[in-house]
Image: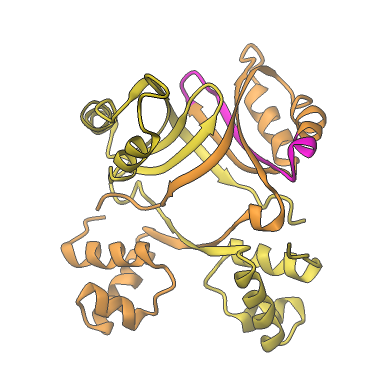
Amino acid sequence: MQLDDTDRRILRQLLADPTLATADLAERAGVTAATCWRRLERLTAAGVLKGQHAVIDWRALGWAVEVSLRFTLDKTNPRAFDEFLAAARDVPEVIEIQTFLGRVDVRLNVIARDMGHYQLVYRDRILTLPHISDIESLMLVSTIKETGSVPL
Amino acid sequence: MIELDDIDRAILRELVADATQSAGAIGRQLGLSQPATWRRIRRLEQAGVLAGRRIDLDTEALGFGVTVFLGVKLAAKGRVSLEDFERAATAIPEVQTVQHVLGLYDYRLRVTARDLADFERVLRRRIMTLPGVGNVEANVLLSEERRPGPLG
């Protein structure tokens, strides 16, 4: 889809604050409410805007530990990826699954209540996942920047 | 810390699936009045559990076809300022996420680019010139899925 400057202005403002009502969004983007509404409809119809989701702060719910687990899988088994991913989806502490091209095959974002709980999750639910050939873990200290935005 | 009951968890699941739903619409699905649902959402917001909204963008439709995760190791620990690195990394528009981690790397960056040539430009001109940057590992994202996590 080809975007013009008006689309980009609207998208930039919307990404900065998704809770804005169309009238406020229009004002910030410097367009009329009718134009803003039409453009949003067009961006939605073209599949650029797919919706909105709420962000949960797991720490506020007492899930203090977040670990990024990077897996290399045993690729001699052609079903390794599918079976690993299916099993990972059944682990409730997994909040994100990503697959990669590179040294890492799959990354799981895992949360736990504390280190003791993490140890349990890691032993009982992670190490038992199928076709693992190597695991590396990165423990999250802090998130400094987090945006789904792109440089428009 | 806030305690959740089954209705709170159901409300969170609904908002994670679609944050644009009104309190009335969510209440109808759960057999709850609009004011009761609204009060619960407000309580979750005040406790910091609902930490804002995120727009789901089809970045590919906007011409950003490549997402790369970088593991960054700082060159000389103790002599480089973490603040300087964080400030400079955060300022790069193509960098969507900056996380301080413990493990094999010091930082995790999520980088978006138009294509691999564009990524190479960002890597050479912006990432490799960050203050204190040492070893960098890149993995190209193939797929990702968010999971509901322990809300079941």
Residue A105 lies, in percent from the top left, at: 55, 24
As drawn, B45 above or below A86: below
Q: Nearer the viewer, residue B85 or B9?
A: B85
Q: Toward which corner of the image does residue B17 lie, by quadrant?
A: bottom right
Residue B81 lies, in percent from the top left, at: 36, 32
Q: Toward which corner of the image does residue B47 lie, by quadrant?
A: bottom right
As drawn, B135 above or below B54: above
Quarter of the figure with the N terminus of chain B: bottom right
Residue at 22% in and 59% down: A3
Residue A130 lies, in percent from the top left, at: 74, 23
**Residue at the extreme top:** A76
Q: Nearer the viewer, residue A43 or B82?
A: B82
Chain B colour in the picture: yellow
Residue at 32% in and 83% down: A23
Residue B116 lies, in percent from the top left, at: 29, 29
Q: Nearer the viewer, residue A112 or B33?
A: A112
Q: Toward which corner of the image does residue B46 lie, by quadrant?
A: bottom right
Q: Nearer the viewer, residue B151 or B66?
A: B151
Residue at 63% in and 84% down: B24
As drawn, A16 above or below B76: below
Magenta segment boundaries in residue numbering: A101-118
**Residue at the extreme left:** A5
Residue at 31% in and 76% down: A25
Q: How many marks?
A: 0
Q: Which chain is orange?
A: A
**Does the segment drawn in magenta span residue B118?**
no
**Does the segment drawn in magenta span residue A117?**
yes
